[in-house]
């Protein structure tokens, strides 16, 4: 599904190199987790994959469902089925959530050659998804993320994932800022959305999310590289001894 | 401690003219003082040539005699401002002064359909004012108002309220407010007694126009006075439109003044929606005095007219007073929108918040904002915020912005910001990451930029009317047709 090779990237504005050769392969049906200290480059990797303009790819490749990701515009990557749940979703004052969701939904449908949904059809389409996430329908009439609590923003991101029916979901710290109920709702929704045909890449600091959504592979990221790959055992090791005990290489 | 924070905007958009001025306290030009002039004889003809041609003697209805006498006297020595006046530096009113302006004749024909087209379902009363004249036969809801409430002409209003007419504009109004005082055919009085509550009053101002080709234009001078007694609640919605069809280029001049007096703990919501015809000149003074613990929430949408200027002055005249201001201005082809706002805080525990948003969508459009918030020595424990966001959609679009927070008190919490930008890249990217094309995202973001303020009006039909005006102006922009690069 997604194959990243020797990916290097820098901050476009400052030229600072953040990703220093990332290798990662996610196959259909797999769940991967990336863990790592703050500032190790997890969010940068996530954003580079969806084409965030702050970063410039300086080397390496990323192939998604057979297509070279870096030749696609951000909206084309979304149409192809790639989705990122942002660590800090921005607020868009003045645009109602329902309009935003419907625009996104119809953009994807159009790219797939499907008929667009009118407001009524869209409402019927979205209500079950709201229920799945335990979200109140009044969310639809509020402006995108405006005044949302941290947990509400994360629920809203997953709602967008559900609406877009993406094949590959990158979830950047969907567990941060969530209380127990919200974490359970969000994890339940992700579990319902994933299948043998989809891939999931989760970025997290905490084991508790991984107890809900079981990863097949766990990667440790450090200074812009994946320095170790294993299974849930790695997470337990991490809980016990911290990142220092895991590194195969010297941190300098 | 004396601190003054001026607006600092990074002029980051290539090819767009931006000028900002920092830390320049407002200085009122001596030529505009009407106090000294008030002693002059009312008989003296104005020195200013345009004023001498423009000012005609008009009948003075009951209640307006003092205002008329003072204003006419002040006019004698008043000079119309030019760009040499600091206050009109970026607002060139030469096209107005080149126009042969005559008071609009009373009694213009207005169909019920036209009034219905501007309906506001949530209003408890609709007052239709045509060329500055109250037209009771077109108005509705005035006979079913709750007790302790008056909405109507000055002649039937409580004398104690009528007496306050001019009390704010006399000392704080600019030249156009003086002109209004000399020409106003009447004054709409909205008075809410102590502890009373009045639902939304919709004041629909309609203006006749002269054909765009000629050099003459009718002028109207609508005037309103709002008094909210202690602990009362009220809402005023002012909407200004032309009598012609939408997007009509006909010329006219509107000289509006609204005075608002809030007694202690009164609460008022005030919407001012300027949707004048594209050829109109519109000058409006809004003057507000807030007694202790009163709350005043003001929303402005200025999307019409050729040259438009709004002078908003608010005085917090007691402790624990709350002031909210939201403004949205859209400057399309050949449109100039100027907002001068001054808020003075003189008492402790005040709260003030101002959000100014301006879009310039055309190379011949210009936005001007001079927003002064002054926190005086006595206004300790004040919480004041001011934010100005300006969106320039095309090369050569111009804004002159001077948000200006002057803080003399030392124990205050203030936030301040100013940005001149293209669309926010972060927002644009968020849409694109969800599969929405850059072009569709731009359209949605541009209309949402203003919607953040416009939604505060709350009345769906009126919000829709403003949105349609915005859509019409933006449709003329080729921005969305240009290729996007990211
Ligand atoms: N847009 C940016 N501009 C400047 N520095 C950035 C930017 N994005 C990320 N960085 C820097 O890159 C490093 C990695 O950041 P990030 O990918 O957010 O880490 P993580 O998500 O693992 O906490 C940090 O040092 C961060 O400051
Ligand atoms: Mg991160």
Image (cartoon, coloured by chain):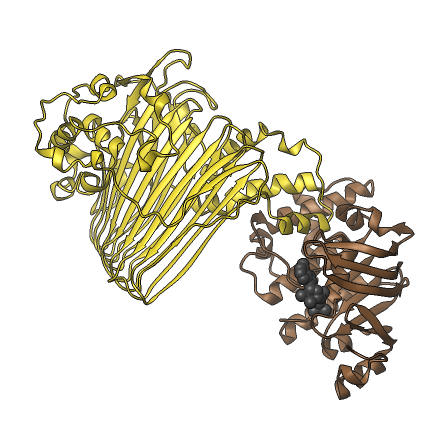
Chain colours: A brown, B yellow
Residue B339 position within the rendered picture, expressed as x and y whole percent measured from the top left: 38, 39
Residue B445 position within the rendered picture, expressed as x and y whole percent measured from the top left: 59, 43
| Quarter holding ligand 1 | bottom right
Compared across the picture, whether A8 is left or right of B273 comes to right
Residue located 57% across and 65% down the image:
A149
Q: Quadrant of the N terminus of chain A?
A: bottom right
In the figure, B477 relative to B418: above or below?
above
Compared across the picture, whether B411 is left or right of A9 comes to left
Outermost residue on the top side: it is B214
In the figure, B156 relative to B211: above or below?
below
Residue A241 position within the rendered picture, expressed as x and y whole percent measured from the top left: 76, 87
From this viewpoint, is residue B456 visible?
Answer: yes
Residue located 43% across and 50% down the image:
B7
* Relative depth, front residue between B480 and B1: B1
Compared across the picture, whether A114 is left or right of A119 comes to right
Q: Quadrant of the C terminus of chain A?
A: bottom right
* Relative depth, front residue between B122 and B269: B269
Residue located 17% across and 34% down the image:
B154
From this viewpoint, is residue A191 visible?
Answer: no
Compared across the picture, whether B128 is left or right of A106 comes to left
Count of numbered tags: 0
Outermost residue on the bottom side: it is A240
In the figure, B467 relative to B416: above or below?
above
Residue B194 position within the rendered picture, expressed as x and y whole percent measured from the top left: 20, 53
């Amino acid at each position: 599904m997604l194959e990243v090779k020797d990916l290097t990237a820098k901050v476009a504005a400052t030229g600072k190199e953040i990703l220093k050769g990332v290798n990662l392969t996610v196959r259909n049906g797999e769940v991967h987790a990336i863990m790592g200290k703050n500032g190790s480059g997890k969010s940068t990797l996530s954003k580079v994959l969806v084409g965030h303009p702050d970063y410039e790819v300086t080397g390496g490749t990323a192939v998604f469902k057979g297509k070279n990701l870096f030749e696609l515009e951000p909206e084309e990557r979304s149409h192809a089925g790639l989705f990122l749940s942002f660590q800090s979703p921005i607020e868009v004052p003045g645009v109602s959530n329902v309009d935003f969701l419907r625009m996104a939904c119809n953009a994807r449908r159009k790219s797939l050659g499907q008929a667009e949904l009118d407001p009524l059809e869209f409402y019927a389409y979205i209500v079950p998804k709201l229920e799945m996430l335990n979200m109140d329908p009044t969310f639809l009439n509020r402006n995108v993320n405006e005044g949302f609590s941290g947990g509400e923003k994360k629920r809203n991101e997953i709602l967008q994932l559900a609406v877009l029916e993406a094949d590959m979901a990158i979830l950047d710290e969907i567990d941060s800022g969530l209380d127990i109920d919200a974490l359970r709702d969000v994890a339940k929704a992700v579990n319902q959305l994933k299948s043998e045909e989809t891939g999931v890449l989760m970025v997290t600091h905490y084991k508790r999310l991984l107890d809900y959504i079981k990863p097949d592979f766990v990667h440790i990221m450090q200074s812009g590289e994946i320095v170790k790959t294993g299974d849930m055992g790695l997470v337990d090791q991490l809980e016990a001894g911290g990142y220092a005990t895991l590194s195969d290489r010297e941190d300098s | 401690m004396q601190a003054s924070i001026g607006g600092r905007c990074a002029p980051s958009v290539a090819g767009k003219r931006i000028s900002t001025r920092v830390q320049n306290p407002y200085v009122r030009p001596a030529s505009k003082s009407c106090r000294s002039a008030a002693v002059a004889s009312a008989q003296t003809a104005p020195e200013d040539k345009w004023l001498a041609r423009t000012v005609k003697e008009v009948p003075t209805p009951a209640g307006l005699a003092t205002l008329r006498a003072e204003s006419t006297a002040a006019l004698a020595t008043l000079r119309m401002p030019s760009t040499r006046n600091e206050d009109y530096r970026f607002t060139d009113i030469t096209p107005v002064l080149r126009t042969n302006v005559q008071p609009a004749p009373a009694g213009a024909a207005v169909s019920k359909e036209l009034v219905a087209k501007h309906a506001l379902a949530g209003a408890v009363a609709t007052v239709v004012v045509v060329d500055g004249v109250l037209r009771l036969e077109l108005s509705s809801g005035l006979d079913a108002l709750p007790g302790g409430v008056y909405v109507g002409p000055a002649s039937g209003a409580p004398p104690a309220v009528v007496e306050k007419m001019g009390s704010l504009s006399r000392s704080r109004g600019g030249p156009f407010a003086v002109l209004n005082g000399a020409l106003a055919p009447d004054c709409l009085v909205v008075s809410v007694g102590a502890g009373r509550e009045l639902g939304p009053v919709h004041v629909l101002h309609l203006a006749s126009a002269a054909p765009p080709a000629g050099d003459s234009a009718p002028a109207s001078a609508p005037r309103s006075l709002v008094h909210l007694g202690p602990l009362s609640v009220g809402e005023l919605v002012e909407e200004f439109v032309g009598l012609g069809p939408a997007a009509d280029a006909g010329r006219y001049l509107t000289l509006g003044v609204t005075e608002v007096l809030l007694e202690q703990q009164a609460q008022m919501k005030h919407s001012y929606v300027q949707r004048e015809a594209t050829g109109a000149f519109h000058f409006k003074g809004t003057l507000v005095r807030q007694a202790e613990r009163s709350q005043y929430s003001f929303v402005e949408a200025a999307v019409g007219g050729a040259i438009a200027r709004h002078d908003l002055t608010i005085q917090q005249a007691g402790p624990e007073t709350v002031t909210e201001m939201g403004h949205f201005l859209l400057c399309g082809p050949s449109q100039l929108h100027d907002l001068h706002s001054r808020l003075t805080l003189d008492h402790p525990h005040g709260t003030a918040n101002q959000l100014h948003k301006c879009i310039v969508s055309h190379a011949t459009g210009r936005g001007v904002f001079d927003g002064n918030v002054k926190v005086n020595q006595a206004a300790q424990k004040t919480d004041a915020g001011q934010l100005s966001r300006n969106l320039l959609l095309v090369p050569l679009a111009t804004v002159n912005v001077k948000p200006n927070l002057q803080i003399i008190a030392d124990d205050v919490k203030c936030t301040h910001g100013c940005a001149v930008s293209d669309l926010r890249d972060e927002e644009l990217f968020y849409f694109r990451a969800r599969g929405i094309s850059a072009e569709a995202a731009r359209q949605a973001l541009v209309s949402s930029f203003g919607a953040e303020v416009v939604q505060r009006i709350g009345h769906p039909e009126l919000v829709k009317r403003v949105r349609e005006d915005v859509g019409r102006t933006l449709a003329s922009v080729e921005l969305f047709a240009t290729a996007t690069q990211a």
